[in-house]
Amino acid sequence: MANEDTPDASPAEKLPESIAIIMDGNGRWAQEHEKPRSEGHREGAESVRAITRECARLGVKELTLYAFSTENWRRPEPEIFLLMELLKEFLIKERAEIMDNDIVFRAVGQLDRLPPEVYQEYEATRDMSARNKGMILRLCLSYGSRQEIFEAAKKMATLAQKDPEAFEALEPDDFRSFLYDPEMRDPDLLIRTSYERRISNFLLWQISYTEIFITKTHWPDFRESQLHNALADYASRERRFGGLIDEEVV
Ligand code: FPP
């Protein structure tokens, strides 16, 4: 669990290359501020802007944000409409910022379920930024990890039929080439705001060895200094990937 008093620091030598975030608590933030839920989502979109900018500035290589889950389609129609509007607004307004910061923009998920006007803006931003060389900003939209794994398994089954030799030669790590973004690095750090202690169908395959940071802060209040706290906490951890560290004596 996060120590909320960790000093504000961003240690360059132990900066995670890849960060994933479950952005939670927009609704609770709104409730605590006696505002409608829509205001929570609007403030949450501001946090997306601030955290993207700061991660790019610090030299993070990939930032993956859980923006809309397959389960979120079950929310009331007006809330879905607002989230899609905010997304569209973000895709249009942030284009200049994305280009200025050399960010590569991508989305993963069941993107064919997005409203056509949102999908069009997504394509435009993706294509415009495709040749940039800086941080990858990846939004998970209409995303569910079980769906991603299931679809990957189906793609593998197709390969088994079409090219049994290639299928037999596959190694466990090759599974990533069937996932939505085969180039995605496994996240080094997963942040979840608003203190729910679950994974909620997010990147189940990719987070096998990821360090997890859970904070009580609601997403709309998660800004630069909260990110620095998470990074300082991450830098203090010893990652062993199931092995031992060099100095350990058996
Ligand atoms: C959780 O809050 C947040 C989401 C539904 C996803 C994140 C959405 C945004 C940050 C808005 C805009 C996004 C972009 C990319 C511009 P919640 O409603 O589940 O909070 P609660 O659990 O407190 O009700």
Image (tube, rainbow, N blue to C red):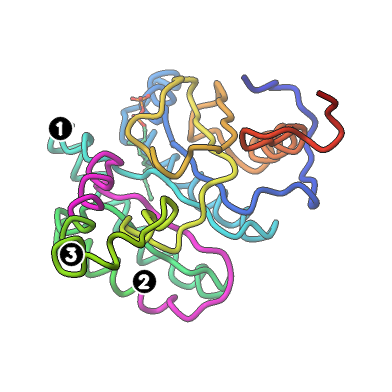
Q: Judging from the image, what secondary structure is the residue with disc 3 in?
A: helix
Residue 125 — which label? 2
Residue at 45% across, 64% down: 183
Q: Quadrant of residue 205?
A: top left
Q: Which residue is mark 1?
A: 74
Disc 1 is placed on an element classified as helix
Location of ligand 1 given as a quarter of the image: top left
Who comes first in sequence, dot 1 or dot 2? Answer: 1
Q: CA distance from mark 1 to mark 2?
A: 27 Å
Name the quadrant of the C terminus: top right
Q: Position of residue 27 (x, y in %)?
A: 36, 26
What residue is shown with label 3? 117
Asked if marks 3 and 1 touch (Cβ < 8 Å), the reply is no
The answer to which of 125 and 16 lies nearer the viewer is: 16
Q: Badges 1 and 2: C-beta atoms under 8 Å apart?
A: no
Give the magenta part as a residue range.
126-154
Whether the magenta-drawn stretch holds residue 65 is answered as: no
Q: Residues within 10 Å of mark 3 (few under 14, many from 20)?
A: few
Residue 189 place in picture, x, y as percent: 58, 40
**Three-letter amino acid code of the residue under disc 1:** Arg
